[in-house]
Image (spheres, rainbow, N blue to C red):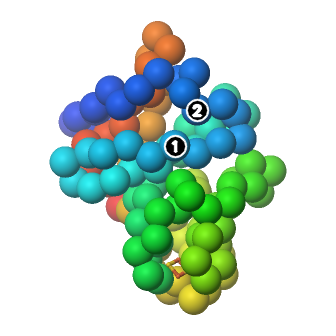
Amino acid sequence: MQGQQFRRVGALAEIPEGEVRAYDLPSGRVAVAHVEQRLFAFGDECTAGGCSLADGTFDDRQAQVTCGSDDSVFDVESGEPVRGPARDPLPVHAARAIDGWVEISLHPLR
Ligand code: FES
């Protein structure tokens, strides 16, 4: 992560464990999932049709988010689609909690 610039987007308390929130970055809207004290940040826009994944359903045991539109499923750690119709992966950002704040890398890792 060396060289990555981070943006503070909100308080960790805003994302209870097992939930997802979306934040605006200059590069686009990024969703952050909170799973067992780990944070995963990924593009909020479903690659199938553009719906917000933060408005979908999150399975924290599988670390997967399901799009509310046509049921595409993504792995929130890798961004890869687990089930279509989506075929392309989501951009994935670095995420960290510092002193109770959530910070996201300004640019995707991939
Ligand atoms: S917009 Fe996500 S599956 Fe259609």
Q: Residue drawn at (50%, 14%), measured in percent from left and top?
A: 100
Pointer 2 or 1: first along the chain: 2
In which image quadrant can residue 69 be found?
bottom right
Residue denoted by label 2: 15
The disc at residue 102 is: none
Circle 1: is it few (<14), some (14-19), or many (20+) Cα within 10 Å?
A: some
Q: Which quadrant holds the N terminus?
A: top left
Circle 2: is it few (<14), some (14-19), or many (20+) Cα within 10 Å?
A: some
Q: Tag 1: residue type?
A: Arg
Q: Nearer the viewer, residue 10 or 80?
A: 10
Asked if the residue under mark 1 is in contact with the one under mark 2, i.e. CB atoms within 8 Å, the reply is: yes
Residue 109 spot, x, y in % from top left: 35, 53
Say whether residue 10 is visible: yes
Q: CA distance from mark 2 to mark 1?
A: 6 Å
Residue denoted by label 1: 21
**Count of numbered circles in the view:** 2
